[in-house]
Image (cartoon, rainbow, N blue to C red):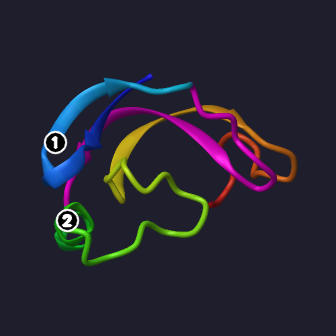
Amino acid sequence: MLAVTIRDGGALELAEHPDPVPGAGEVLVRVRAAGLNGADILQRRGAYPAPPGSPPDIPGLELAGAAAGRGPGAPPPGGLL
């Protein structure tokens, strides 16, 4: 997958990463749009940790897209998240 990636010094770069695999209770989303919020900007500066289990070099807490897969125990298509 391609993702905006935080590099040394806080520079942002589009880079290739392994495709994610949804874990238990998780839904994989094919992202169509993403935004950076205040927490992402702080993460870029090294002043805010990535959420547990999230890659520390890929910001983006806000996104929109379509479900592309689900892990064990994740809600079915059309189910409430």
Q: Residues within 10 Å of mark 1 (few under 14, many from 20)?
A: some
Numbered mark located on residue 12 in the image: 1
In the rendered picture of this protein, how many numbered marks are placed on residues? 2
> Residue at left 36%, top 59%?
61
Task: List x then y, in percent, for residue 69.
Answer: 68, 31
Identify the residue under disc 2: 37
Q: On the rendered image, what quadrant is the C terminus found in?
A: bottom right
Up-down: is 32 above or below 53?
A: above
**Residue situated in front as seen by the camera: 31 or 2:** 2
> Residue at left 20%, top 72%?
42
Q: Dots 1 and 2: beta carbons under 8 Å?
A: no
Looking at the image, residue 51 sits to the left or right of residue 80; the answer is left
Residue sticking out furthest to the front: 8
Asked whether residue 21 is drawn in magenta, I would say: yes
Asked whether residue 69 is drawn in magenta, I would say: no
Q: On the rendered image, what quadrant is the N terminus found in?
A: top left
> Residue at left 19%, top 33%?
13
Up-down: is 26 above or below 33?
A: below
Secondary structure type for disc 1: strand
Q: Closer to the N terminus: mark 1 or mark 2?
A: 1
Looking at the image, residue 52 sits to the left or right of residue 15; the answer is right
> Residue at left 31%, top 26%?
15
**Residue situated in front as seen by the camera: 79 or 61:** 61
Q: CA distance from mark 1 to mark 2?
A: 14 Å
Looking at the image, residue 79 sits to the left or right of residue 63; the answer is right
Q: Residues within 10 Å of mark 2 (few under 14, many from 20)?
A: few
Q: Which residues fall within the magenta stretch?
A: 19-36
**Residue situated in front as seen by the camera: 77 or 25:** 25
Secondary structure type for disc 2: loop
Up-down: is 65 above or below 57?
A: above
